[in-house]
Image (cartoon, rainbow, N blue to C red):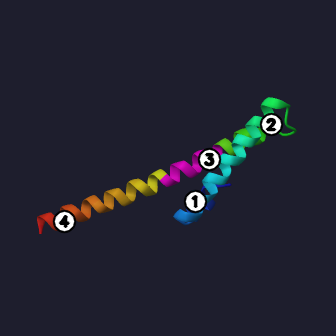
Amino acid sequence: MKNEEVKGMSNKELSTTYKEERKRYQKMKFQNTVSQIDQPHKLSMTRRNIARMLTELNSRRIQSELAAFLKKNNEENN
């Protein structure tokens, strides 16, 4: 999954995909612990996808909080 794909998702899609990726990563990690999986590089790819999604979710959260703060300040000043 590329950054452009992540940025193009809505908040709901992004959070749903994030939860699915976390579950898949946990299953893959467990399978790798029990017995070696065929494609171990998928663990790191999944981990990076999770990080991309978290980064985008956090940046959207910060932007919305900043917008709310600025709106509140503008209302107080006027």
Residue nearer the viewer, 5 or 24? 24
Estimate the spatial distance between the alpha carbons at disc 1 and disc 3, rounded to whole Å.
10 Å
Q: Amino acid at mark 2?
A: Gln
Give the labeled residue for mark 2.
Answer: 31
Q: Residue at x 68, y 47 (%)?
A: 23
* Amino acid tagged 1: Leu
Circles 1 and 2 in contact, beta carbons < 8 Å: no
Residue furthest left as drawn: 78
Q: Secondary structure at mark 1?
A: helix
Residue named by callout 4 = 74
Q: Is residue 38 left or right of residue 2?
A: right
Extreme right residue here? 38
For disc 2, the neighbor class at 10 Å (few under 14, some 14 to 19, many from 20) is few
Q: Amino acid at mark 3?
A: Ile
The part of the chain drawn in magenta is: 48-57
Q: Going by the image, does 32 lie left or right of 7?
A: right
Q: Which mark is residue 50?
A: 3
In the image, residue 54 lies in the stretch drawn in magenta:
yes
Magenta segment's dominant SS is helix
Q: Are marks 3 and 4 in contact (CB under 8 Å)?
A: no
The quadrant the C terminus occupies is bottom left
Q: CA distance from mark 2 to mark 4?
A: 54 Å
Which type of secondary structure does the marked residue at label 3 adopt?
A: helix
What separation in Å lies between label 1 and label 4 (alpha carbons)?
31 Å
